[in-house]
Amino acid sequence: MAEEPQADSRGEARQSFFAKQKLIQSTRAVFQQLSGVLKNASLYPAAHPFLLSSAEKLLKQIKDLLVMRKEVTFYLVGGELFFETNSVPIDLSLATLVEQFTNRDVGGVIFRPGLTPEEIIRFAYLMNNDAKFFADRTKVEAAMALEKISHIEIHRALLVDKKAAASIKEGKKKTEKVFIDAVDTVKGMVQSVHAEKVINMRQVNSTVQKLVDNILQNRDALIGMTSLKMYDEYTFAHSVNVSVLAISLGTYLSFEKPQVAALGVAGLMHDIGKVSVPLEIINKPDKLTEREWAMVKRHPIEGALLLADVPAMTKLAMVASFEHHQHGDVYGYPRIDNMVQQHPFSQIISIADAYDAIIAARVYYKVPTPPYQGVRILLEKRGTNFNAVLVKAFVNMVGIFPIGTVVKLDNGEVGIVMHQTSNLMRPRILILTKFDGSEKEDPSAMISLLEIEDGHPKRSIIGTIEPTGAGIDIKKYLE
């Protein structure tokens, strides 16, 4: 069973989050300083004070990162910069350096202990050679050996070959199975309640653990599954979607694993009280009567009472079930006198629940709301209905253009968002040409909007396209 997060563990999670942000800023500063060294190397001789000073500053930043590390490694993948598993934001101040590396087929650089300012300067002069010089990898290696550059290593750009593509495809299949198994777990929970049997918490915890592990490996893939419309399974899929989104936000905020698991359980359980509401009311296509709406509004109370009788149930699941509709406006429910502030986990569940409800194509919605519009609705309600800080973190996680959004580019191309990058406006997309789902078999069709050409973004989003109206079945791309 997931452990109950305590006040001190929440503090540790916040420290972990801020430590991660500080690390990302430090790594970004290294690349900015590296850009300055290369620029100075193109202007000044090796002994010039400006060049030497910039090399010394870069070395200091690298040494700070080398503490507790054997090496400092940067990778460039599709125009996106990574340090270890962290995506490092790229702006125009780094565009020239990124383009310089890309044009030379350099996929990254490794710095090791023993580095000196003089070696950095020799490396900078080498990197300022033209692209033809880097076409012969043997020639590059010989030049680095001749210049005694032994504490810096450059490696080729990472390419997605057939083997890697097969691995990605296999990972997607695993994600689909984890998601469908989670839907089956929710079905089992509901059936147990209707049959007045005890909910199988061992199965629930096992399901949540699989969701957590899968999200830690590939958050975007499982978030993508929440964008799919399971019309016949909405009641069950909604609980899984909320669990996935809550777990994802917990990992994004660097919560400890027991906290993330507790969020996952709370997400699966948040709507369990709806078993007390007749199905004809849950699925009613028309406006609910006052009596029917009053029955629906009791589901948080019924859920908390039901979960209180489940052995090994986490207290946080009970709290989240009771509080997840207690928004900061007059429409929040259940209303209580002297209402205290929602628990932070309840606030996360509230955001995940609202977002999924907004974008879902339920029986009483004639037209589904696209994910990017769902993001905008959340932003409009931050600080009133929802915690402003958590909404910002949620939007940073899912992106301004969430996975599954079909976008139009400034060069006339059409693509579907498949992954987020460090820039909310520049996700990684799959270029659509056949519109039948086959594009995902072509690795070259996947591009990053972070790619730079002549110092400027190669492509930019100029608008979105409603997939249903355009005859695009996003399910073919996300499954």
Image (cartoon, rainbow, N blue to C red):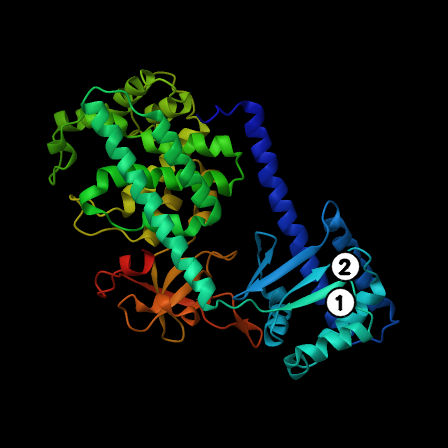
Q: Is residue 221 left or right of residue 227?
A: right
Residue 252 vertical placement versus 48 (above, below): above
Q: Position of residue 441 (x, y in %)?
A: 36, 67
Dot 2 alpha-carbon crowd within 10 angstroms: few under 14, some 14 to 19, many 20 or more: many
Report if residue 364 is visible in the image.
yes
Question: What amino acid type is highlighted by mark number 2?
Answer: Leu
Q: Nearer the viewer, residue 124 or 108?
A: 108
Q: Kindly identify which residue carries mark 1.
A: 37
Q: Position of residue 290 (x, y in %)?
A: 14, 27
Question: What amino acid type is highlighted by mark number 1?
Answer: Val
Report if residue 128 is visible in the image.
no
Residue appearing at x 27%, y 57% in the figure: 475
Q: Position of residue 22 (x, y in %)?
A: 64, 45
Residue appearing at x 31%, y 55% in the figure: 479
* Alpha carbon separation for disc pair 1 and 2: 8 Å
Q: Nearer the viewer, residue 470 or 189?
A: 189
Q: Are marks 1 and 2 in contact (CB under 8 Å)?
A: yes
Q: Kindly identify which residue carries mark 2.
A: 58
Indicate the quadrant where residue 203 lies.
Answer: top left
Q: Nearer the viewer, residue 183 or 462?
A: 183
Indicate the quadrant where residue 330 lies.
Answer: top left
Residue 479 vertical placement versus 44 (above, below): above
Q: Is residue 68 left or right of residue 291?
A: right
